Image: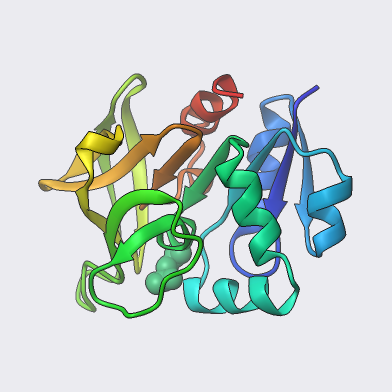
Amino acid sequence: MKRVGILAVQGAFAEHKIVIEQLGAEAFEIRQKADLTEQGADAIILPGGESTVIGKLLKELDMFDKLQRMILEGIPLMGTCAGLILLAKEISNDDSRYLGTMDITAKRNAYGRQLGSFHTKGMFKGIGEIPMTFIRAPYIESVADQEGVEVLAKVDGNIVAARQKNMLVTAFHPELSQDLRVHQFFLEQI
Ligand code: GLN
């Protein structure tokens, strides 16, 4: 059975766990470094939350370098919302950089205050039309296409899902809908 570790230091990790279990895989929480090294994860999810807080905790809990190495070594990984920001090589409106393993430029809180949270539907390449919930979400301002970043979804012309090698990111929260197909899509890559 596939074992999916969900980073559980802050943010919306519980919902991911439920979805992964509904799809018949095993899910466990990554709360400390030992969970990264000893639990035998086949894949990892970086949930939504506050990228600044999660980034800081990854350092404080001494998980940052190990996680970054596992990603570079190819562990399948899905990042949603703050998880997308953590993976981005560039953040256009912030000086911080976190794991920086994916050749995308993210814009934090990209929809401004008026449109802090919203719900829509959009086409996701390889899946079809899916519900998309955005919560103070980023979007992907640009991708380095020579690095093989594939755009999977756009909303109003902005990139909201992409993948590169072992990394899949969404600006929206697929774990907050009843539609399990994005997680299914992810599990199929493992
Ligand atoms: N606004 C958050 C950030 O910048 C992301 C929000 C989310 O993950 N729902 O990290």
Q: Is residue 33 found left or right of 16 in the rendered image?
A: right
Comparing 31 with 48, the one in front is 31
Query: Can residue 73 be seen in this snapshot?
Result: yes
Quadrant of res 90: bottom left
Quick check: 26 above or below 100? Answer: above
Residue 101: percent from the left, percent from the top? 45, 52
**Image point (33%, 80%), residue name:** 95
User: From the viewer's perspective, is residue 26 above or below residue 138?
Assistant: above
**Relative to 130, residue 157 above or below:** below
Q: Is residue 122 visible?
A: no
Figure quadrant, ligand 1: bottom left
In x, y percent, where is residue 138? 31, 62
Give the position of the C terminus as an image quadrant.
top right
Instruction: Identify which residue is drawn at 35% across, 69% down.
Output: 136
Please tell me which residue lies in front, 176 or 187: 187
Q: Residue at x 65, y 62 (%)?
A: 65
Q: Residue at x 83, y 50 (%)?
A: 37
Q: Quadrant of residue 163?
A: top left
Q: Is residue 92 left or right of residue 166?
A: left
Q: Across the whole image, how many numbered discs are drawn on residues?
A: 0
Name the residue nearer the viewer: 93 or 1. 93
Name the residue at the left extreme.
Answer: 157
Q: Is residue 178 above or below residue 159?
A: above
Name the image quarter holding the N terminus. top right
Which sits in the foreground, 138 or 112?
138
Task: Give the side of residue 71 with respect to residue 94, left or right.
Answer: right
Where residue 16 sits in the image (x, y, percent)? 62, 46
Side of 37 relative to 145 (left or right):
right
